[in-house]
Amino acid sequence: MAVQLNHTIVHARDNRESAEFFAELLGLEIGTEWGPFVAVDLSNDITLDFATVPADTIMPQHYAFLVAEAEFDAAYEKITARGLAHWADPQQTHPGEINRNDGGKGVYFTDPSGHFMELITVPYGGRPQQ
């Protein structure tokens, strides 16, 4: 069998709040709650397993998601409607904007626990989405 990522644990101040934020933003389903985890299923058979941990132990991570144009537009509409701070770049020098890197669209924002989230419609380098 080829090596595949199956799941990753995302530390959160409140696992339910973070899972719901992410799932609602991208139109995803929350999976089965298992032990301390609230899972969000991604379309490529990977789950993000949100786990509540003490806030002072959360080290912000970067999570980038490849989405279709329609998914990007719907998510970006929610980002702006909620008044979420967002940027066209990871250095946060272009607030309130999206980027058009590699012929697609991209945006950066933070989740309720301070993780750096990125949505892109074209992978880095301009490879077409499959």
Image: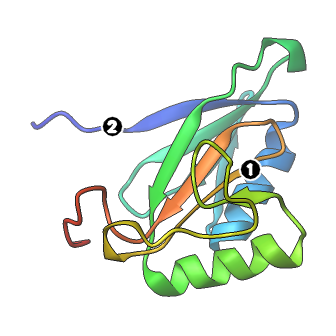
Three-letter residue code for mark 2: Leu
Q: Residue furthest top?
A: 57
Compared with 94, 33 (above or below) is above
Looking at the picture, tell me which residue is in the foreground, 69 or 91: 91
Count of numbered circles in the view: 2
Q: Residue furthest front?
A: 93
Quarter residue 9 falls in: top right
Residue 54: x and y in percent read 87, 16
Q: Label 2's element? A: loop
Instruction: Say which mark, if any, is on residue 94.
Output: none
Task: Give the quarter of the figure containing the N terminus.
Answer: top left
Q: Residue furthest left?
A: 1
Q: Is residue 62 found left or right of 129 in the rendered image?
A: right
Residue 56: x and y in percent read 87, 13
Three-letter residue code for mark 1: Ala
Compared with 77, 50 (above or below) is above
Task: Give the quarter of the figure containing the C terminus.
Answer: bottom left
Disc 1 target residue? 19
Residue 77: x and y in percent read 73, 82
Label 2 to label 1: alpha-carbon separation:
19 Å
Q: Residue at x 62, y 49 (%)?
A: 117
Q: Residue at x 68, y 76 (%)?
A: 76
Looking at the picture, tell me which residue is in the foreground, 87 or 47: 87
Disc 2 target residue? 5
Instruction: Check disc 2: other Cα within 10 Å, few if <14, some if 14-19, many if 20+.
Output: few
Q: Label 1's element? A: helix
Q: Residue at x 38, y 54 (%)?
A: 45
Residue 100: x and y in percent read 45, 73
Q: Is residue 91 found left or right of 123 in the rendered image?
A: right
